Amino acid sequence: MIRPGKRTLTATIALLLLLQTAAPVLACPVCFSANKKSRTAFLVTTGLLSTMPWMIIGGGVFWYKRRLRELDEESAPDHEHEDVVPVDRNSQ
């Protein structure tokens, strides 16, 4: 008699093998179109959608760094308008 754990393992392996033998499905009629315009549009759109997450992340990093720089400039003391006399430590 086959143990329950072994039966599950056998069923899982059989399912994985079945999935590996399935023919690829063409989900988009434009992907493999013979029409030059459709093919170009597909490739441009693929490139745009592939680079968009990187552009969004880069824009967020750029904004964050610029905002930190602005906050540092706001919190830095303004030494131009202060009457500070330098101290000569050698005269003591």
Image (tube, rainbow, N blue to C red):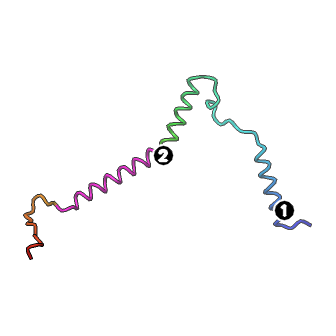
Residue 36: percent from the left, percent from the top? 58, 23
* Type of secondary structure dominating the magenta stretch: helix
Q: CA distance from mark 2 to mark 1?
A: 43 Å
Write the start and end of the magenta stretch as one range.
Answer: 54-77
Tag 1 or tag 2, which sits nearer the N-term?
1
Work out which quarter of the rendered image holds the C terminus and state it: bottom left
Question: Identity of the amino acid at label 1?
Answer: Arg
Q: Does the magenta portion include 50?
A: no
User: Measured from the top left, where is residue 23 in percent x and y?
Assistant: 75, 39
Q: Is residue 40 left or right of residue 65?
A: right
Q: Which residue is mark 2?
A: 53
Judge whether residue 75 is colored magenta. Answer: yes
Task: Establish if 9 lies above or below 28.
Answer: below
Q: Is residue 78 above or below residue 60?
A: below
* Mark number displayed over residue 54: none
**Label of residue 7 in the image:** 1
Q: Is label 2 in a helix, a strand or a loop?
A: helix
* Quadrant in the rendering for residue 8: bottom right
Residue that sits furthest to the right in the current view: 1
Question: Would you place residue 55 above or below residue 73 in this image?
Answer: above
Residue 12 located left or right of residue 65: right
Q: Residue at x 35, y 54 (%)?
A: 64
Instruction: Determine which quarter of the picture holds residue 12.
Output: bottom right
Tell me where residue 79 appears, x and y as whole percent: 14, 60
In the image, what residue type sits under mark 2?
Pro
The residue at 86%/67% (across/down) is 3
- In the displayed structure image, the side of residue 2 where residue 79 appears, left or right: left
Can you say which quadrant of the picture contains the N terminus?
A: bottom right
Assign a secondary structure to mark 1: helix
Left or right of residue 21, residue 87 in this image:
left
User: Dot 1, how many residues are within 10 Å of its Cα: few (below 14), some (14-19), or many (20+)?
Assistant: few
